[in-house]
Image (cartoon, grey):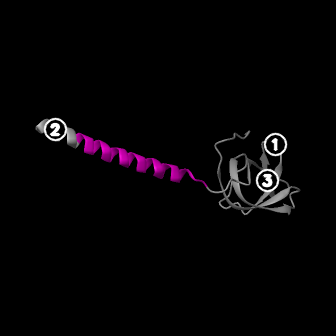
């Protein structure tokens, strides 16, 4: 009689754990959804005389505006924002809304 109760209890506990695992997997999938892709990814550099630039791996150059907080030169970053046309640095300007360090590329020192 006790063996039957233990078997029933084991089945109930296993079923509860299976449901909990399925719910956790669904929540994990929901967290994977990401926001928009960055407008550009590359290495920062100083453009003479007063511009701050970004060069992509395909050698496209951009002038970055409003990069707050300040980004040091020779830093790999992902940039979000809007391209605003030609800038005083001689390249297409990007009005930066946000940026973060990029782990997908390396910059030369």
Picture quarter with the C terminus: top right
The numbered disc on residue 58 is: 1
At x 14% / y 36%, what residue is drawn?
A: 3
- Measure the C-alpha gap from mark 2 to mark 3: 73 Å
Q: Secondary structure at mark 2?
A: helix
Tell me the crowding category of disc 2: few under 14, some 14 to 19, or many 20 or more residues within 10 angstroms, Cα based: few
Q: Is residue 11 magenta?
A: yes
Q: Position of residue 6 (x, y in %)?
A: 17, 39
Q: Which stretch did the figure color magenta?
A: 10-34
| Mark 1 vs 2, N-terminal side | 2
Quarter residue 48 falls in: bottom right
The numbered disc on residue 4 is: 2
In the visual, does 52 lie left or right of 15?
Answer: right
Q: Position of residue 43 (x, y in %)?
A: 74, 46
Q: Mark 3 — residue?
A: 53
In the visual, does 85 lie left or right of 24?
Answer: right
| Mark 2 vs 3, N-terminal side | 2
- Measure the C-alpha gap from mark 3 to mark 1: 14 Å
In the picture as drawn, the residue positioned furthest to the top comes out as: 3
At x 45% / y 47%, what residue is drawn?
A: 25
Q: Secondary structure at mark 1?
A: loop
| Mark 3 vs 1, N-terminal side | 3
At x 20% / y 38%, what residue is drawn?
A: 7
Residue 80 drawn above or below residue 57 = below
Q: Position of residue 5 (x, y in %)?
A: 16, 41
Nearest to the eye among marks 2 and 3: give it.
2
Majority secondary structure of magenta residues: helix
User: Nearest the camera: 68 or 61?
Assistant: 61
At x 64% / y 43%, what residue is drawn?
A: 103
Q: Secondary structure at mark 3?
A: strand
């Amino acid at each position: 009689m006790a063996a039957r109760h233990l078997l029933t209890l084991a089945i109930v506990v296993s079923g509860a754990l299976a449901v909990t695992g399925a719910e956790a997997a669904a929540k994990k999938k929901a967290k994977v959804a990401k926001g928009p892709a960055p407008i550009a990814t590359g290495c920062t550099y100083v453009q003479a005389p007063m511009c701050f630039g970004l060069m992509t791996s395909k050698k496209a150059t951009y002038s970055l505006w409003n990069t707050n907080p300040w980004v040091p030169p020779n830093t790999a970053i992902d940039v979000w924002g809007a391209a605003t046309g030609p800038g005083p640095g001689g390249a297409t300007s990007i009005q930066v809304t946000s940026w973060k360090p990029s782990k997908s590329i390396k910059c030369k020192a």
